[in-house]
Amino acid sequence: MRPRPGQEIEIDVDRVAMEGRAVGRLDELVVFVEKALPGERVRARVGRVKRNFAEARTVEVLRASPARVAGRCAHLDLCGGCSWQELDYEAQLDAKTDLVRESLERLGGFRGLDVPRTLASPRTFFYRNKMEFSFFVGREGGTVLGLHVPGTFDRVFDLDACHLMSEESNAIVARVRELASRSGRPAYHSRRHEGFWRYLVVREAKNTGQTMVNLVTHEGPLPNRDEFVRVLTGEFPAVKSLLRSINTRRATIAVGETEELLSGEPEIEEQLGSLRFRIAANSFFQTNTLQAERLFDLAVDWCGLTGAEEVLDLYAGTGAISLFLAQRARRVTGIELVPDSVAMAEKNAELNGIDNTRFLTGEVRDFFKKRVGEASAARVVLVDPPRAGMHTDIVEALRLLQPPRIVYVSCNPATLARDLQLLCRDARYTLVRVQPIDMFPHTSHIECVAQLDLGGRTP
């Protein structure tokens, strides 16, 4: 019998899905269960019921998994940021490996592929170098500063401590909340679109110890400006960049149309390996600094460069991987849509004295259409697309140009499997190897590196 919304059921769960929820079956109906772990039997309350699946949330764990551990965070039941925090870390790595293998088999058709165990993160807590915190109006008109309740845009809980950023960043959040509360200006209300304080963004350069604090507000004079500068730079010497960004748009994003430098420098500096990187308020930079260096080293190693190759870096961002590649290639051309990212990539190349890179602004698809000759010269192509993966036009362009090697860096195993299947169609390319990498402990997110060589067999 099909369950009804609100009904409580008992169910055994045996694995996790890509979104991090546990999966069980009630007769033939697939049920996605929140707050449950593989190997557990739970009592769960049913939410949505669709034709092919249902959703439920655990009410009571009847038989706990041996891999269940005590959660570290006081906000565990309210915050969705660390949905796997109660799963032992070794079990997290195994689950992520299984998710990648399942995606490649089920969505990509790659049967019997050896998928090595997910590469563990050097740190499982305090590993993030950037977090965004939201202001909100409390029930009695007070100023709330914290994180969003999962699945909502208008519910924010006051943050006591987050174990993904450093202890210092938690202290910064507390001081900014106090200063904003005493400012006489209200927090921004995302439904009424009024108020002043919108977001706090903290960025930390883990290897250099430099911190950036960015106050994102609505327009108008910044109250108690001198106090903000005195407190945040005096109590936190690591703060080398204190900014105020003005966002007048209704979009709920922690990005401003204009920036005002309150103290220090407009950027902070990080170091990965022998390379230095300047990071601005809106720059993209891999969130797990220590693991990013391992990811870049692996991707570059799989490119198999001898120093004679022309390399294309598609979706180059601020040029981090391009600069790693440039140390081993004859020349690297990075393609990136966002002009500010291209400008930062050029700045980072100059900072490191690297003169064998060039960065072009525009759509990757347009590059293949307008610069076919330049694209054809590439012996190695590295792609690092967003979660949606590559457009089919780009996949077909790569199949037509036939670079001898493609190295694909992915943050989404599902779109990775889809794109790999298209690239390998008709034995055009062979998937040689793939390595899952854990960039985000305690979450279901997985990064992967895959190597494809020209020629081979259809999966």
Image (tube, rainbow, N blue to C red):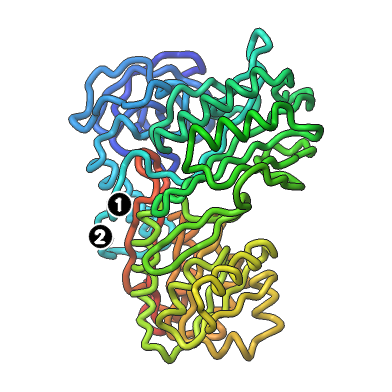
447 in relation to 85, above or below:
below
- SS for tag 1? helix
Residue at 57%, 63% in the rendered image: 317
Name the residue type under label 1: Thr
Q: Which quadrant would residue 82 be assigned to in this image?
A: top left
Image mark for residue 116: 2
Whether residue 420 sits left or right of residue 358 in the image: it is left
Read off the residue under disc 1. 97
Q: What is the x, y in percent for residue 76?
A: 40, 24
392 in relation to 73, above or below:
below
Q: What is the x, y in percent for residue 221?
A: 79, 32
Question: Which of marks 1 and 2 precedes in the sequence?
Answer: 1
- SS for tag 2? loop
CB atoms at circles 2 and 1 under 8 Å apart? yes
Q: Quadrant of the N terminus?
A: top left
Pointer 2 local density, CA inside 10 Å: few below 14, some 14–19, many at least 20: some
Name the residue type under label 2: Pro
